[in-house]
Image (cartoon, coloured by chain):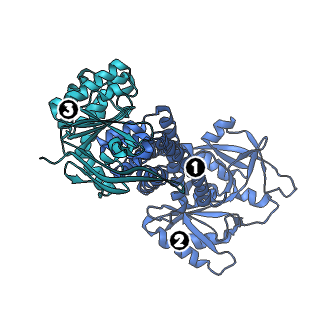
Amino acid sequence: MSEPMVAVRSITKVYERGAQKIEVLHGLTLEIPKGDFVALMGPSGSGKTTLLNLIGGLDQPTSGEIRVGGSRIDQLSRGQLARWRAHNVGFVFQFYNLMPVLSAQANVELPLLLTKLSATQRRRNAAVALQVVGLADRAHHKPRELSGGQEQRVAIARALVSDPQLLVCDEPTGDLDRQTADEILGLLQVLNAEHGKTIVIVTHDPKAAGFARRTLHLEKGRLLEQAA
Amino acid sequence: MTRTGLVVANLFRRRTRTILTLLSVIMAFLLFGLLQSINSIFSAGEDFVGATRLVTQARVSFTQPLPLSMLPKLEAIPGVARVAYSQWFGGVWQDHTPVFAFAVDPLRQRDVYPEFTMPAAQWQAFAATRTGMIAGRALADKYGWKIGQKVPLASNIYPQKNGSKAWVFDLVGIYDGTTEDTRKQAISAYINHDYFDEANAFGKGRVNFFILRLADASRAAAIARTIDAMFENSPDETKTQTEKQFNLSFVKQIGDIGLIVRWILFAVFFTLLLVVGNTMAQSVRERIPELAVLKTLGFSDGAVLGFVLAEALTLCLCGGLIGLALATFAGAAVERGSGGQFALRPDLAVWLLGLAAILLMSLAVGLLPALRARRLKIVDALAGR
């Protein structure tokens, strides 16, 4: 059996807010195979975004072990984690988080500034990524000149452009109408099915979760089956 | 898309704010260039190279007169071709309008200042007329003076023996410069020292300074030393300097020019620090989530710090270089306008100092926001905490 894309073992996460300590995740264990498309659901405060941040290497667990793509990331320094993120994971956020001063093309090129690609290659790769998400004709538009759905497509192109195996998406359709949300989720399905990307999304929306291959429920910092 | 492109794009996200800040940096460095040039002029050491005239005055101050009896001793020094002398008259024309008027020996004046010309007959008339006066073309034109007319001048220093400070002179000549620069300097009036010396109520046989025309410019420094040594420990100790330094010493009477310049620059740069520092801090504060996204994409803490510092440097460098360039143009214009008397064009030393100021200022205004950007935690920043 091949190694899972994500292997989370007994992780806890404690936030300190002043003198107060808040344990958000309690010894959570989870495996996500390569090529899976997983939706994380749960009420607010259940720890799903915290788990997503840990899987994506945006934060470190208080204890426990996280392996992604075979690399143990819970022991990396901030600098090492930044380098790891640049090559191994793509991020999609609820509010797109594009750079408003850059065109769609330049936004997609951003992660490639961390590679050794030439300017021409960077341009070419960004154009391909925009083509994949169906926005080749909007390459020179600034984010404010695009609709919400188009902005999210640009964000997905930016997440894809350095060809990571893992995409983590935090409420990717939370700011979109139903039809546009379905288009975005359909695009994620295509990336999963045709490009073999492992995708983890956090959502409140059961319809959005329906696009995933499986859904995991979190409650009070535990996976529901573990919570019992 | 390049890192430089990202820096420039971020810098101009609020175009109006950036342009206004840029203008304040430009103005500050324009002032810096001009004032620092003034400072350089006044703080420069004595340079005798190429000096064809020296000025000897009392060591303490040129306001303290020297005895005219020094004249033969000065003329006897090898390398001195001709000596003129001059006494400040302190002329006032009509309603309190000051006129640069000096009591001089007419023919010595002519011989020592060949760059000012006048028909020979007018020089002779000046020498022969005890109450004679000559005026520069620019001065005569300004007040409409014509040869042959009487010019009443009051002196704010010297009364006549009858106690009156009102003097009347006969305008016998109008001199002019031989070049465009010297024509601009033809703004003084000269009266006959013999007449002034007899008629004024204060001491006789004294002058404010001697002007020595040299036969050999290469000996200027040695001649200056010889003169000052000659009168050392006498009641009338002297200070001999080049004409350029002497002119500057007039302006230095205002006060410590260097200190004034430093205080002005301190005020300018302190204000600039607040303006640009505020712009940078605001710029970082309003895009915390964007900086967090850069980190999310894999840019290191150091890279994000570098972006913010690069923005500060770009802003200060653009404004600073434009300001210094404008100071160079303005300085050249002042230099031309003053007939070369005030060389305000920033030299290499001022440019290098300006570049150092640009780097320091970039660091001062960029470092705190850059450190803030470096320290920010992705999850907190994305969550708006």
Q: Amino acid at mark 1?
A: Val
Left or right of B291? Residue B26 is: right
Neighbour class for label 2 at 10 Å: few (<14), some, many (≥20)? many
- The image position of residue A165, as x and y in percent, is 20, 41
Q: Nearer the viewer, residue A131 or B180?
A: A131
Q: Nearer the viewer, mark 1 or mark 3?
A: 3
Numbered mark located on residue B268 in the image: 1
Asked whether the beta carbons under mark 2 and mark 1 sit within 8 Å of each other, the answer is no
Q: Check contact, mark 3 vs mark 2: CB within 8 A.
A: no
- Binning the other alpha carbons within 10 Å of mark 1 as few (below 14), some (14 to 19) or many (20 upward) gives some
Colour blue belongs to chain: B
> Looking at the picture, does residue A4 appear above or below residue B207?
above
Per the rendering, the mark at residue B224 is 2
Subunit of label 2: B
Instruction: Report the residue marked by disc 3.
Output: A192
Find chain A in the image and tell me its colour.
Answer: cyan
Q: Is residue A185 left or right of residue B199?
A: left
As displayed, is residue B346 above or below residue A123? below
What amino acid is found at the position of numbered circle 2 in the picture?
Answer: Ala
Residue at (66, 37) in percent of width and height: B142
What residue is shown at x 20% (from left), y 30% (from top)? Answer: A191
Classify B382 as above or below B232. above
- Same subunit, labels 1 and 3: the answer reads no
Q: Residues within 10 Å of mark 3 (few under 14, many from 20)?
A: many
Residues B112 and B350: in front is B350
